[in-house]
Amino acid sequence: MSDTPEILARDDGGTIAYCQTPGQTPGVIFLTGFKSDMTGSKALALEDFCRQRGTAFLRFDYTGHGQSSGAFEDGTIGEWADDAITALDRLTEGPQILVGSSMGGWIMLLAALARPDRIAGLVGTAAAPDFTEDLIPNELSDEQKKQMAEQGFAEIPNCYDEEPYKITKALLDDGRDHLLLRGEIPLDCPVRLIHGTNDEDVPWQISLNIAERVRSVDVETLFVKNGDHRLSEPRDLERLCRTVGRLLDQLQSHSS
């Protein structure tokens, strides 16, 4: 395996960095979280798992993330969802399982709604749809709200990185155009949701909300006692791979 990613040129001149493993379909596509990248432990654990199974796998960086072009603070939910749809369209063939971590759980739902015929299943881990509307505004101090109003952005401390998040008004405004938890989510594929009960960033109730709103009747929600937001301990990675593997087995048994 090469650590050097391949590069997909977007029609707008931007570039998406990606790493791909050939194999059987349904394939698996990993969608990272907010300000995360494709070198995280969940992406790499799934890549290794899929390689051992002979399953096609794709991981990539949204624009403004990792090794893709662009600045993080210029990105929006709509643009990152478009990155995912572009990667799905241009880098994969046949049915795919989307695995979304945190913000990636929102992106996977948006991509599945855009390409329902290509999606065989969804697996969310600490999925965070609508976080720009339901979570971030509640966390802003009066000073940060003032900064947002005057400068168009607010800086929020990042417990995973020394550099603070720069949250822009454009991100919040665009997020409002992509909200999913206000009505039915018209998807009929199998959905698996994993969430830690001690998640301090994204409340576990959001996964319950997703499960209730997705139209599919094949929805399972797994709550991890004392699990944190990242769910990246060895047992968490094993659980994620096991969940994806069972879904692959189910899909392959139905197609045979």
Image (cartoon, rainbow, N blue to C red):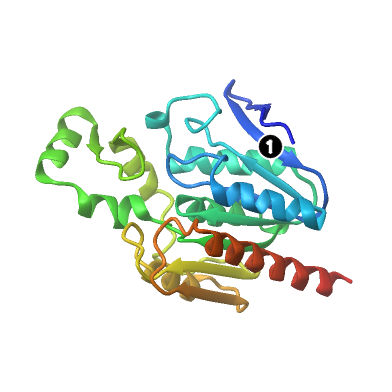
Quarter location, residue 60: top right
Of the 4 image quadrants, the one containing the C terminus is: bottom right
Q: Which residue is mark 1?
A: 19
Q: Residue furthest bottom?
A: 217
- Residue at the image position 15 percent from the left and 41 percent from the top: 145
Which structural element holds mark 1?
strand
- Residue at the image position 53 percent from the left and 63 percent from the top: 236
Towards the viewer: 112 or 52: 52
- Residue at the image position 76 percent from the left and 56 percent from the top: 95
Of the 4 image quadrants, the one containing the N terminus is: top right
Q: Residue furthest right?
A: 256
Q: How many marks?
A: 1
Q: Residue furthest front?
A: 234
Percent x, y for residue 213?
47, 72
Towards the viewer: 157 or 113: 157
> In the displayed structure, does residue 56 sit left or right of residue 171?
right
Towards the viewer: 118 or 96: 96
> In the displayed structure, does residue 144 sit left or right of residue 245?
left
Percent x, y for residue 114?
61, 51
**Mark 1 neighbour density, 10 Å: few (under 14) some (14–19) many (20 or more):** some
Percent x, y for residue 94?
80, 52
The amino acid type, in three-letter code, at marker 1 is: Cys
Percent x, y for residue 185?
51, 66
User: Relative to residue 132, is residue 192 depicted above or below?
Assistant: below
Q: Residue furthest left?
A: 142
User: Relative to residue 34, is residue 18 depicted above or below?
Assistant: above
